[in-house]
Image (cartoon, grey):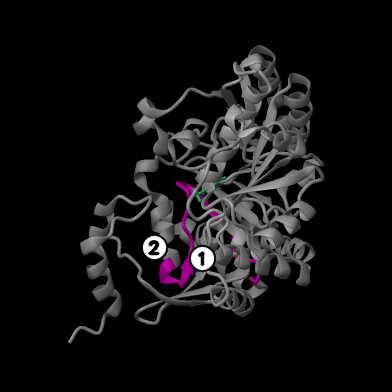
Amino acid sequence: MNNDLNAQWMQRDLAVLWHPCTQMKDHECIPLIPIQRAQGLYLEDFNGNRYLDAISSWWTTLFGHCHPYINERIKAQVDTLEHVMLAGFSHQPVIELSERLVHITPTGLNRVFYADNGSSSIEVALKMSLHYWRNQGQSQKTRFATITNGYHGETIGTMSVGDIPLYTDTYKALLFDSIKVPTPDCYWREAGQSWEDYSRHMFTHMEKALAEHHHHIAAVILEPLVQGAAGMRMYHPVYLSLLRQACDRYNVHLIVDEIAVGMGRTGTLFACEQAHITPDFMVLSKGLTGGYLPLAAVLTTDTVYEAFYDDYEKLNGFLHSHTYTGNPLACAAALATLDLIEQENIIQKNQQTAQYMAQATAHLHDHPHVAEVRQTGMILAIEMVKDKASKTPFDWRERRGLRIFNHALSQGVLLRPLGNVIYFMPPYIIEKSHIDLLAQVASDGIDLAVR
Ligand SMILES: Cc1ncc(COP(=O)(O)O)c(C=O)c1O
């Protein structure tokens, strides 16, 4: 009898499923890992192997898997109200969550609109911005500006404002044209130049684009401080401060995509706090429910809200909907997550954890195949290169990151490099001994991968 339960589940899976972000042929040689259960930092497969989830399952799991408190809140909610449509109806969890989000986000974000995943909520923000200008009699404002290397999801609109060729190039024929200005990504700063100086310098491109096109631009959209899918590329908050000022000067909205970096990831509850700005739209998802259930929120200002408030027949209303908008179970998970962030003093705790992550990986700065170890709060990234001095990358087709992925799995760690970038984005409950293990696995993995 075959005791390899993983193999059995893998076989059944591959007979019927088509997995996301996957070339399915890879699974002819790379085993798929069916997960039976999870607890805290660990995922467990059907053969009883455990994997430390160092990337929070696609950047969502803030307090670990199957957290007893979040579980309880969802269980209580499921026996009370599992779902009701949010058009014409409302419920306690969505009202409470909206009140709390308004309270904890930057001053002036007083209205919350819900969607059920990150991409959809970005689409909401784009449509709302364009529609706002139309309602204001400025229907020529239909374009969006953004920075290169950005990622906002994989629907048609989000790919149009995104800039990761691997995901967008094939679908170019479907995408609308957006204005892309060079990213302030500080990986490309000159030796000795500070992040702040480089980010300030790169802002001149954005200033120029806004000066030239602002009559037609509805909004600028970007990921604040960390461009996640591009390989955790980072920049200084001064760029966001300058951008806020410029958007005001040129009468253009600012959409801040905090889907990956919100909820305490960057050292503050929201990344844009570090620039002391209030965007016109702030978009949250992923960690919003602690990694439990799909939910997304678009926060905006009274000014935007009031531009839609009119008689129905004028068609100024925002007639956008998703079936599971504001689902009560997801809202209950989000409320529990906010409770944990408050009760566990998580922002301060994360600062200490982040410091330890830096310490544990400090030796990698001198590694001959590491061009940079960079960090923003609880996101730490290690850029593996072919040549350190020139920052020449390894050819992506060599898939050296995959070797690190495989090595990490053999050591009981889930790392999923983005190309040549190895990163840690762990649940906030991670402890020093786990971080030591991650650092060791990453170092050994790089040594193996560069051979
Ligand atoms: C910054 C950012 N925006 C948007 C998205 C899209 O979210 P979703 O995958 O829920 O559609 C992601 C997903 O990784 C993201 O990192």
Q: Quadrant of the N terminus?
A: bottom left
Q: Residues within 10 Å of mark 2 (few under 14, many from 20)?
A: some
Residue at far top of view? 212
Residue 128 position in % (x across, y down):
61, 34
**Amino acid type shown at disc 1:** Val
Up-down: is 288 above or below 171?
below
Describe the element under mark 1 as helix, strand or loop: helix
Residue at (35, 79) in percent of width and height: 46
> Sequence order check: which comes first, mark 1 or mark 2?
2
Residue 149 position in % (x across, y down):
54, 35
Which of 352/213 is in front?
A: 213
Q: Is residue 11 visible?
A: yes
User: Which label number is shown at residue 64?
Assistant: none
Q: Which residue is mark 2?
A: 406
User: Which label number is shown at residue 441?
Assistant: 1
Residue 339 position in % (x across, y down):
72, 69
Ligand 1 has an atom within 8 Å of the beta carbon of the residue at disc 2: no
Describe the element under mark 2 as helix, strand or loop: helix
Residue range of the region highlighted in magenta in the rendering? 409-430
Residue 245 position in % (x across, y down):
79, 27
